[in-house]
Amino acid sequence: MKTTKGKVIKENGEEPRLQRSFPMDASTFAQIDPLHWILDMNSLVGDAYRDVRELCVFLLLAVASSFPPSKALAVYFQPPGHPFLFCGAVHPARPSALLSLPWPDPSEEPPIPDPNPNPLQLALASAKIGVSVEGLASLPPVAYTSAEKKAERLALRVGENLFNFMQSFCGIDGSRLVVPMDILDRWFKKFQERARKDPNYLKDFSL
């Protein structure tokens, strides 16, 4: 496994490259039981865990060849004060993967209430990576970032607005809606006009 720190630098006008990475093997993780391992991010980057945005995970050939085909090595991340969130998995049919770590915004993370936290409070306040052996068919969905959720909500609102506009001009052909070919241009022009006339109109699409 290798974690990638997300900061980039440029040299001599060349394309940006990653500044740091942290190659690791299984010994870096603390084994909780035969099927679960945890890595405390403080051991790598302290409280700068948000700079680590990707994990490159792979099964060595010897491990992949002996790994049960119905099992997967699931990878989770845990922001401080949050539960573990699934970010991907590797298995014999997919022995390597580059996984994103969608850390939440700082505003979504509860602060440590005690100015002089004890070791247990510090442990709960640190970011972690978790790995577990699980059934391939029962893996949970990949966690989304708050930005991705906001983008989905925005897309839904814009789509609903467009659909309502199309209903005013469409015809019905069996189970199909038939609309003019320039319907998108007409909708967008109306959208722009309303936004210019009413500054509060765009607030309906705010995230």
Image (cartoon, rainbow, N blue to C red):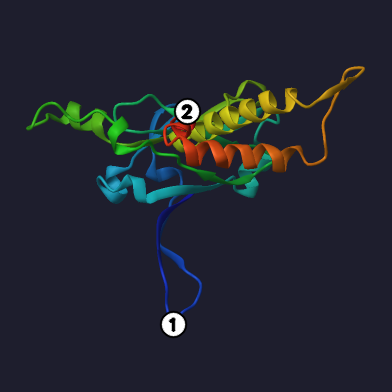
Q: Mark 1 points at which residue?
A: 12
The residue tagged with tag 2: helix, strand or loop? helix
Q: In this view, does 185 lie to the left or right of 105?
A: right
Query: What amino acid type is highlighted by mark number 2?
Result: Asp
| Image x and y of residue 191, in percent | 59, 37
The local crowd at label 1, few if under 14, some if 14 to 19, many if 20 or more residues have their Cα within 10 Å, is few
Farthest-out residue, bottom = 12
| Image x and y of residue 62, in percent | 63, 46
Mark identifier at residue 192: none
Q: Name the residue under label 2.
A: 204
Can you tell which quarter of the image residue 110 is in?
A: top left
Relative depth, front residue between 202 and 112: 202
Q: In this view, does 156 lie to the left or right of 173?
A: left
Looking at the picture, does residue 77 appear above or below residue 83?
Answer: below
Q: Is residue 18 left or right of residue 163?
A: left
Looking at the picture, does residue 10 appear above or below residue 198?
Answer: below
Farthest-out residue, front = 197
Relative depth, front residue between 145 and 167: 167
The residue tagged with tag 1: helix, strand or loop? loop
| Image x and y of residue 151, in percent | 52, 36
Can you tell which quarter of the image residue 176 is in?
A: top right
